Image (tube, grey):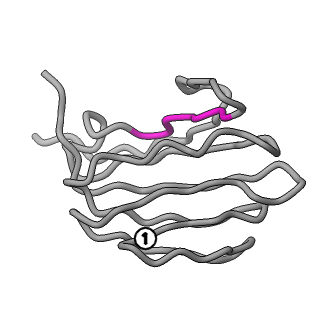
Amino acid sequence: MPSKPVGKFIHRDQTRIASGGGNAIATLLTGDETAGRFAVREIVADPGAAPAPSLPSHENRYVFVVAGEWEIEAGGERRTVQDGVSVFIPAGATYAARLTGAAQGKLLEIAAPVARRG
């Protein structure tokens, strides 16, 4: 008998967090955990932090600005955005994000599909 799908509750403090350049990047779900369908990262940046790294261009990306003022470039268009704005970046388009505000900022990034390791 096939097993029922199981949900997963995720707290950022229980994830792998990479830090550097004033950024803390929490990988909330990996492609391995979703059979390559999508991956989710939370990026928290301090004022004056280095740009948030982008995901490989072979992935579609959805970026939601949770907090702060950011300069986001998507497909050659650059805008300054704040809390509540979302951006869709199709595979192959350029993407960069830089915190420009004086307060800490937070982004949620969803990438799909993602390459599975192994």
Looking at the image, residue 31 sits to the left or right of residue 12; the answer is left
- Looking at the image, is 81 positioned above or below residue 62? below
- Residue drawn 67% across the image and 74% down it: 80
- Quadrant position of residue 74: bottom left
In front: 53, or 18? 53
- Looking at the image, is 95 positioned above or below residue 23? below
- Residue 115 percent coordinates (x, y): 18, 40
**Which residue, given by chain and number where applicable, does mark 1 sit on?**
74
Give the residues in magenta: 23-29
- Looking at the image, is 87 positioned above or below residue 4? below
- Quadrant position of residue 43: top right
- Residue 79 percent coordinates (x, y): 60, 77
Q: Is residue 24 magenta?
A: yes
- Residue drawn 58% across the image and 25% down it: 17
- Residue drawn 79% across the image and 41% down it: 46
In front: 79, or 13? 79
